[in-house]
Image (cartoon, coloured by chain):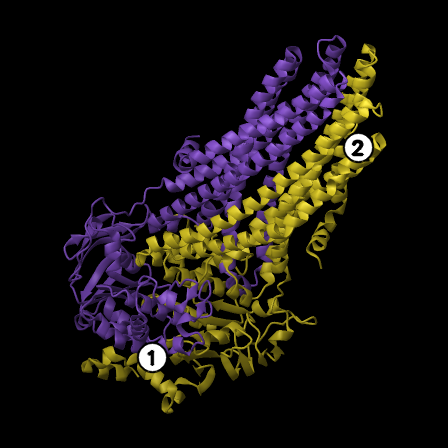
Chain colours: A yellow, B purple
Amino acid sequence: MNTLTRFLTILRPYRRQALLAIFFSAGMPLTILPIPFFIKYLVDTVIALQQPQLLINVLIGLVAVYLAHNILCILFHLNISYLGQRIVLDLRYKLFRHLQRLSLSFYDQTQTGTIISKTIDDVDVIQMLISGPAVQAVTGIITITVVSILLFFNDWRLAIVTLAVMPLYILNFKLFIKRIKSCNLRNREKMDEILGDVQEKISGVQVVKAFSMERQEVEYFTSKIREKFGLGLEQGALGSTFSAIAIIISGLGTALVLWLGGLEVRYGLITIGDLLAFNTLISMLYTPALQLSELNDVVQQAITSLERIFELMDTEPDIQESLHACHLPLIKGSISFKNVTFGYLPDQTILHDICLEIEPGQMVALVGHTGSGKSSIINLLPRFYDIHSGSIEIDGYDIREVQISSLRDQIGIVLQDPLLFNISIRENIAYGRLEASMKEVEEAAKSAEIHDFIMTLPQGYNTCLGDEGIKISMGEKQRIAIARAILKQPRILILDEATSALDSLSETLIQTALDKIMQGRTSIVVAHRLSTILNADKIVVLDDGHIVQLGAHEELLQQEGPYRRFYEEQFMNQAIMSRPELKGALFNIV
Amino acid sequence: MYNFLRLLRKYIRPYSDKVLAAVVLMFMHTGFAMAMPLVLKYLVDDVLYKERYHLLIWVFLVYLGLRAMNSLVAYMRGLIVVRLGQAVVYLLRRDIYAQLNRLQLSYYDRTQSGKIVSRLINDVNIIQNMVTTSFITYFTDLITLVTAIGILLSINTQLAFLAILVIPAYIINYNGFIGRVRENSHRIRRKTDEIIAYLSERISGVRVIKAFNQEKQENKRAFKKLRTYYHLNYRAAMLSSGMSIIAQILSGMSTAVVLWYGGYLVLQDRLSTGGLIAFYSLVAYLYNPAVHFSQINTVIQRMRAALDRIYELLDMYPQIADKPGSPALKAEEGHIRFENVSFRYDGTRRVLEKITLDIPSGSKVAVIGRSGSGKSTLASLIARFYDPTEGYITIDGQDIREVKIESLRKQIGIVFQESMLFSGTIRDNICYGSPRATDEEMIIATRAARIDDFVEALPDNYYSMIGERGVSLSGGQKQRIAIARALLTQPRILIFDDCTSALDAQTEAAIQETLQDIMKNRTNLVITHRLSTIIDADLIVVLDEGSIVEQGVHDALLNLGGVYASMFQQQFGLVNP
C-alpha cells in the first residue's frame, strides 16, 4: 500500500474531525475572496462616481468578511490542534504497543537510538505535516481553483496569461522533488547513526574514561557531525534554489498582468478597478502556490518519516501466538526438549538436536563452557526465540501451541543482567504482580535477603532507582531481581548465573531461600558453584550445543568424561595445585 | 537572555561576516518587496489615470526586475543562513560532546542517559531552528515594520497614524499570552525528556518485560505518559492559536478601517487612488510582521529553555580535572598507597571509611567482601573516577590528584564487572584504548584472554561486527574481550573487578594461567567472589561496610578464623569447619 494511502487509514477514526478540518481550511480562503471586489467597488463605484454615501458599505462589508474569516479560523484551530495531537498520541501508542509485541531478535538487531527516533522525532514530523502543510495544501488547492474561476469571469485574457505561468511552476517542482527527497533521507539516517553512537558511548562512559579515550571519542563524533553538516548544506542549497526559481516565475505572472492589463484599460476592455481587483486576486493565487511548492519540502520529509514509522510497524514479531493457542493451565512443571535445534539467526546453529526430560519439581543444573549453549536453552523455555526444529513441551503442551502470556506467567526468570527499571524498589519487586500487597513484597524481599538493605535506605521501598539502577551495587540489584522473580510464585524457575556478582555470604543466604522456593517447583539453573551442582537432581553437561553428559553429580563423577574434568578444574585450578598442603583438605570435601 | 548573548559571542560571532551579509540581504529583500506597491501606485496614478500608456512597458520591466532581484537575494540569503545554522549546530554539538567527555562519572550516575542525549540532539535542533528560521523572520519583520511605517507616513500621515494605532493592541495581546506559553513549553520539554528516558529504559529491559508478561501493563503506563504529553501539546497549540487569531482580528479590522477612511480621503482629494491601493498593499507589510511576532514567540520561548539547558551543561565544572600544569604520572614501580581514604557518593551513605592500604609494586592484592562493601569503589578511586572525600591515594609517591589524569589512566588497565563493549568489529573493541596496536600485539592479548579460538572461528574473525549491546556474544565472551582490551594497553597496574564471573571454571583457570605471566612485573588488584583464584595472592583484604576488617595472606587469614575463613568454608561447601 502506498505510504500516503496508509496514512489516511490512520486518520480514519478521526474522519469527522478531518472532514471538518478540510471544510474549515477550504472556508478560510473563501471568506476573504470578496475583498478584491470591495476594492473594485471602492475604485470604480465610490471613487470614480463620487458617491461618498456608499463608503459605509465598504466598511460594513469588509468588517463582516473579516469577522467571518476569523470565526472560521478559531474553529479551525480548535479542530486541527485536536486532530494533530490526537493522531500523534495514537501513532505513538500504536508504535509502543507494537514494540511490546516484537520479539527479542528484533531488539538484538536494532539500535535503541533508531527506535526512539522513530517514536519521537518521526511522529513529530507527522504532527507538523497535519497541522501545517496538510492544511496549507487544502487551502491552497481550494484557493487556486476558486481564484482561477474568478479570474476567468473577470477577464479571460488576463486569466490565460496568469495561468500560462503555472506549467513552469510544476516543471520546477518536478525538477527538484527527487533530489530533495533523497537528501532528506540521507540526513535522517546520518542523524540516527549519530544518535545510536552517542547513546552507546554514554552508557559506556566508564570504559571511555578508563582507557583515556575522551579525545578520540570527541574527534570521532566531530567527524560524524561534520558529515551531517555537509548533508545539511546540501539540503539547504536544494531548498533555496527551488524556492528562488518559484519566486521568479510568480513574479513574471504578476508583471505580465500589470503590463497587459494596463493595455486593456487603454483600450477600454476593463476598468482600473477591474485591474486592481485582478491584481489582488493574483496575489491570492501565487501565495498559496508558493506555499504549495514549498510544501514539497515538508511533505517529502513527512513521507520519509511515515515510511520509517511504517517500516517499524510492518516488522512482524518472529514469535507469533498460534491462532488456536489454548490457555496453558496451571502446570505441574514437566519439561521436555525433543530434538531441539536452534540458532539466533536462520543459518546459525547454536543448539544441536537437544533431547532432555525434566520431571516436575526437579532441579536441573546446566553446566558447560562459555558459549556451549546454556543461555540459549533457558532463552527457549519462555519462548523468547523459536526453535528451528524439534519441539519443547511443558506438561505435554507444545509451547508454540499455548498462549504466550499463560506460558510466561508460570516461569520465573532471574537474568544475568538484573535490568531494573527507573521506578521505586517496591514497583520493581512487584513488577510481575502489580496487585501484590506490601506484605507480599516484603516477604519476597526477605527471601531474597534484600529487605534489610532496603530498610537502610531513607525512603525504604519507595526509593526510586536511578538510571539503570546505577547507585546500588550489582549484588543488590541482583537480589532485587531475585525478589521480583520470587514474588511471581512461578511454577518453573530459571536462574541464569544469577548469583555471579554476590559474595559467598549473601549467596549462601539466597541459596537457602532459593532452595525453599525451588521445593515443589521445576528449576533450571545455570551456575558454576558447587552447592548448586551438588543439590541438582540432574546435571546437563553441554558442549558446543550438544548434551554430552546427563545425570546426577555422583553418577557423573564416576564416569570418565567432560564433567569430571570440568569439576576438577573448577576446584583444583592452578592456584590450589601450587599449595600441596591445601590439596588434601580439598579432596576431603569431595 | 544572558545565555543568548553568550551564544552570540561564542558561536555566532565567528561568522559575523555571514551574519552581516545575511542582514544586508534582508534589507535588500525588504527594499525590493516594499518597492512593488509603489510600482502599483505609479501604474494607477501616473500611467492609467494620466493615460500615458507608453510607460506600461516600464512598469512591466521594473516590476519583473524587482521580482528577479528579490529572488536572487532570497536565494543568497537562504544559502548563507543554512550555512550559518549548520555551522552553529556543528560547533555547539562538538563543544557539548567534549564537555560530556570532561565530566566526571558522578554526573552520569546522577543524570538519565535519555536527558543527556536530549541535550545533544533535541536542544541543539531547537537552536538550529532559531538561527535558520526564527532569527531571520524576526529580523526581517523588524526591518519590514520600520520601512513600512516610513513609507506609509510619506503617503498619508493621517491614514498612517490610523493604521499604526493598532500596534499597541498587538503588544498587549502578545504580553497577555507570553507567560503561559513559556511555562507550558518548559513542561513540554521536561515531559519529552521523561518519555525518551522511559522508552530507552523499556527497550533495554525488553527481556524483563517479556519474562514478566508486562506488555499490557507497560502499554497502560506508556499511554498515561503519552496522554499527559498530548494534553500539554494541545494546550500549547491552543495558546499559540489564541494569540495569532486575536492578532488576525486586529489586522483585519484595521484594514477595513483603512480602506474606508482612505476612500473618504480620496473623495476629499487628499489622497490619490494609486496611493490608497499602495497603502492597502503596504498595510499587509505592517500587520503580517506583527502577526509573525506573536507567532514567533513560542519558538523563542522554546529556544530560551533549550539554551538554558545547554548552558547549564556547558557551565558544569568538571569535578575531576587536571590541575593546571600538573605533571605526567611517573609510574615506574606501580606502588599504590591509600592514606586514610574515606569516600561517599554525593552526600549519600558512606561507602569507604578510613582506608589505609599499601599495594607494593609487582604484587597481587585481592579485595573481597560482601556485595556493597565498597570493593568496586575502591578500584574506581585508583583510576580517579571519583575523588576521595577524605585522605589521598598515591602511586609511586605521587598524589594522583596532582598528576595528569590521562597519564594516570594510561598506566591502569581495568576490566569491569559489566563488560561494556561498543558496536563495531571485535578488533575495534580489543584495540579500544590502543588504536595504534599492531595485529601481532592484538593477537597476543586475545590469546592471553583465551578468546582467540572463538574469534578466529568466526567468519570475519577479528573483523566480525558485534551489536549495539554485544548481544550475539555470551557474557563470558564479552568478559574475555574486555580482558583482552585491558591487557593490550600494557598497563603498569591491572585491576580486575569481578570480571570473570560469567566464565566457567575451565576458561577462568586457563586465563589465570596466562595471566600469571602478565601479572608479573605489574601491580595487580583483583576483586572477586571466587576465593579459589586468590589463594596465592600476596595480600588479601577483606572489606565490610567500607572498612578493612581483615588483611593478610591466605594461610594467616584461615588461621585467624574470622570473616575470610568462614567465607572460604562456605564457598567450598563445608557446613561446619
Please determine whether, in this image, residue A492 is positioned above or below residue B35.
Answer: below
From the image, tell me which residue sits under label 1: B506
What secondary structure is marked by label 1? helix
Callout 2, which amino acid? Answer: Leu
B347 left or right of A535 in image: left
Residue A20: x %, y % from top left: 76, 40
A584 left or right of B434 in image: left
Residue A151: x %, y % from top left: 81, 33
B170 left or right of B472 in image: right
Within 10 Å of disc 1 (Cα), the crowding (few <14, some 14-19, many 20+) is many
What secondary structure is marked by label 2? helix
The image quadrant where one finds the N terminus of chain A is bottom right
Callout 1, which amino acid? Answer: Gln
Q: Quadrant of residue B273?
A: top right
Q: Which mark is residue A158?
A: 2
Residue B382 in sight in this render: no
Residue A99: x %, y % from top left: 58, 59
Letter of the chain that mark 1 sits on in the rendering: B
Within 10 Å of disc 2 (Cα), the crowding (few <14, some 14-19, many 20+) is many
